[in-house]
Image (cartoon, coloured by chain):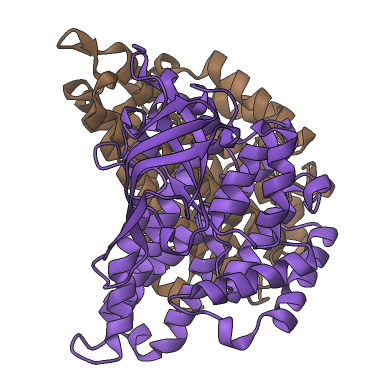
Chain colours: A purple, B brown
């Protein structure tokens, strides 16, 4: 048993760390919110370095790193306080295209995703279809060389920045098994008939939207995989790259900031002990994450359903840290507002990307056999 | 990076597990506890035959030079089987003598310990010394100093988790051990780390047996594991166990190869905090999900509850370790 990284892995970490120190612009560092321009500026810096899509196949621009290297890389990004890599293009649409897309689709979309020319968003949830995604109703009817799309998506993160949206749509409402009537469709956000309505969240910020489709014509070429096989695509995506859902680098950074910002609170034993418990949970999560990576390496198998615990624990830790930060500050002070807003904002983490209750369902069913 | 036991450790763990499955199941354990002394000399002799009593000792004394991770593979299995022979205190006292004893003391004691002819106990005071009733020597850690005692009287009793313990009246001052600073902390951290490993074994059993119960116990015409309210609680137990296992790996690894005493102490305290929380959470839930049966002596889960309840507080409780963690 050896919990340390190998010399090669340590050298890799140092390489990433020093590159970030030299190339992360100060004005992009550690902001609560990033504009589209800021996000894309950072995206292009990484693309120029060749590091924007490490997990892709090498032919399309991937780095060929091991799972451990990818983990180290992502943790270093989080710890350095970089802008996020918006996942919808790089980590969601692209892997789907690589696995299921036609050559034409790959050539058309992948380079533009890599270079940050297209901004993507994800059209999954609907007002009546949250955790029960397969009940979705937005329908696409084939008419000649087009699909005509009608319906509504919700919680569409950064749709107001997006050039494209990938959607799950219902192409066959008649099948008994509702998973079998769903298709995966790529839709240009400039299409006629698409309207957006911002949904302001309780931190007062505009992250998410409602997207309405009103007789939107989508070329049939934009269907990914086969018609009515969209659920297969969605399931593939759910199983893809789930090794950094713990956001360990980011939480380490938040923890360090908390200690630096509130040294006097460290003398308050009650607060300090609450913080220590979160720190311990984070230490444990880091090792649990490394244990999963080690298991993948040993067995050559993709991660099991039990990695859902990384999302559960990671988001609980993220939330606990924002709560502790808020509790350390004067409730009425102007400076506290940012901490309060972050606390409000982070409540979403246990709800999005498969609520933590759904993650527990997954572990119960797939890992424990209940 | 590697979270496996190495081949030797795995072989050892497997042979210990096989032995415990064959000779130390719940019924066999009950019979041992029904004897007046409450532990088995035969079992201790078997430990010696398997090389366990010499595991952490140098080959110079008939041992195998094992570290904390080697011991972890053994005590984890002990935790699963709820072994009542006080192996860990004897190994800790031996480690203290090995680290701080004179050549003479080592020669007089360690080979006998390795061969299973001598048993030791490790005391941090006069009261509540686990293993005292069966110890020929006791190492006493008090006021930051270690002393070795061979003359003492023991008023024996059993702990809540059925370990032979006693209040000890030491006669004389004993022989001083280990002037070198840090030996005491090192030994206590070894003990704390291994108590974490033992807890991980007990946590594993508590999770496994509860999961099995959820799948077999039927109410309202279905296995109770079909109810989501119980599924989610089972998942949380499982996560607690995995997080605890991670921290036991960390603690034992750091005891073997920490960069500094501070690094070691911080990791061990973190592990103790997480494992104490897991012990409490998992043991309480395991009994709750077993319903009334979980409360009875008849099921092993109630004995596991008792072991976890005790382990959570041995070698420093959560509050003490929170204090130390924050100070480092």
Whether A257 is drawn above or below A285: the answer is: below
Res. A135 image quadrant: top left
Instruction: Locate residue A276, reporting x and y percent.
Output: 40, 69
Comparing B95 with A49, the one in front is A49
Whether B207 is drawn above or below A172: the answer is: below
Res. B305 image quadrant: top left
Comparing B288 with A287, the one in front is A287
Residue A245 can be seen in this image: yes
- The residue depicted at 61 percent of the width and 75 percent of the height is A80
Instruction: Locate residue A339, reporting x and y percent.
Output: 32, 79
Whether A348 is drawn above or below A310: the answer is: below
Instruction: Locate residue B327, reporting x and y percent.
Output: 46, 79
- The residue depicted at 76 percent of the width and 59 percent of the height is B104
- The residue depicted at 70 percent of the width and 46 percent of the height is A108
**In this image, A119 relative to A323: left or right?**
right
Instruction: Locate residue A216, reporting x and y percent.
Output: 41, 42
């Amino acid at each position: 048993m050896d919990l340390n990284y190998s010399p090669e892995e340590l050298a890799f970490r140092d390489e990433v760390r020093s590159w970030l120190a030299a190339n992360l612009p100060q004005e992009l560092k550690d902001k609560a919110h990033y504009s589209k321009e800021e996000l894309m500026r950072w995206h292009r810096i990484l693309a120029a370095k060749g590091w924007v899509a490490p997990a892709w196949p090498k032919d399309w621009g991937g780095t060929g790193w091991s799972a451990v290297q990818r983990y180290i890389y992502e943790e270093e990004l989080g710890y350095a306080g970089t802008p996020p890599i918006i996942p919808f293009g790089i980590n969601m649409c692209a892997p789907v295209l690589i696995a299921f897309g036609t050559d034409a689709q790959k050539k058309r979309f992948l380079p533009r995703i890599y270079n940050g020319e297209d901004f993507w968003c994800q059209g999954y949830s609907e007002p009546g279809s949250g955790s029960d995604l397969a009940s979705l109703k937005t329908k696409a009817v084939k008419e000649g060389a087009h699909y005509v799309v009608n319906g509504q998506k919700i919680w569409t993160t950064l749709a107001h920045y997006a050039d494209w949206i990938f959607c799950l749509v219902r192409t066959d409402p008649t099948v008994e098994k509702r998973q079998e009537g769903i298709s995966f469709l790529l839709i240009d956000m400039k299409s006629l008939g698409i309207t957006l309505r911002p949904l302001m969240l309780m931190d007062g910020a505009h992250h998410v939207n409602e997207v309405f489709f009103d007789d939107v014509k989508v070329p049939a070429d934009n269907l990914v995989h086969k018609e009515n096989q969209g659920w297969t695509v969605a399931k593939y995506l759910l199983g893809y790259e789930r090794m950094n859902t713990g956001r360990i680098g980011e939480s380490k950074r938040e923890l360090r900031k908390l200690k630096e910002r509130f040294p006097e609170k460290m003398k308050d034993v009650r607060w300090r002990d609450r913080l220590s418990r979160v720190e311990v949970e984070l230490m444990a999560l880091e090792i649990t994450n490394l244990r999963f990576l080690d298991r993948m390496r040993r067995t050559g198998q993709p991660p099991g359903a039990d990695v859902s615990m990384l999302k559960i624990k990671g988001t609980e830790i993220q939330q606990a840290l924002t709560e502790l930060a808020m509790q350390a500050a004067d409730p009425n002070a102007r400076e506290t507002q940012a901490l309060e807003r972050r606390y409000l904002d982070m409540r979403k983490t246990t709800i999005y990307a498969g609520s933590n209750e759904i993650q527990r369902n997954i572990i119960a069913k797939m890992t424990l056999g209940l | 990076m590697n979270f496996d036991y190495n081949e030797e450790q795995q072989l050892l763990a497997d042979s210990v597990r096989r032995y415990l499955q064959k000779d130390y199941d719940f019924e066999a354990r009950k019979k041992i506890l029904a004897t007046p002394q409450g532990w088995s000399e035969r079992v201790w002799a078997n430990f010696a035959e398997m090389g366990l009593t010499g595991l952490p000792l140098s080959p110079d004394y008939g041992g195998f030079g094992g570290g904390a991770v080697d011991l972890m593979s053994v005590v984890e299995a002990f935790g699963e089987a709820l072994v009542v022979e006080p192996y860990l205190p004897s190994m800790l006292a031996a480690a203290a003598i090995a680290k701080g004893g004179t050549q003479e003391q080592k020669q007089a004691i360690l080979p006998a310990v390795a061969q299973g002819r001598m048993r030791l106990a490790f005391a941090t005071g006069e009261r509540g010394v686990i293993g005292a009733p069966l110890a020929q020597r006791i190492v006493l850690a008090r006021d930051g100093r270690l002393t070795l005692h061979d003359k003492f009287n023991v008023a024996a009793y059993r702990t809540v988790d059925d370990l032979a313990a006693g209040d000890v009246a030491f006669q004389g001052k004993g022989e001083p051990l280990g002037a070198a600073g840090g030996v005491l902390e090192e030994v206590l951290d070894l003990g704390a780390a291994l108590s974490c490993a033992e807890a991980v074994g007990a946590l594993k059993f508590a999770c496994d047996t509860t999961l099995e119960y959820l799948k077999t116990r039927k109410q309202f015409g279905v296995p109770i594991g079909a109810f989501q309210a119980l599924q989610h609680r089972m998942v949380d137990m499982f996560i607690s166990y995995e997080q605890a296992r991670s921290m036991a790996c960390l603690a034992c690894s750091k005891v073997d190869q920490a960069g500094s005493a501070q690094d070691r102490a911080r990791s061990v305290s973190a592990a103790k905090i997480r494992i104490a929380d897991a012990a409490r959470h998992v043991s309480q839930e395991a009994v709750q999900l077993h319903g009334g049966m979980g409360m009875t002596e008849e099921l092993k889960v109630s004995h596991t509850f008792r072991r976890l309840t005790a382990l959570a507080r041995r070698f420093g409780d959560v509050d003490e370790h929170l204090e130390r963690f924050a100070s480092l």
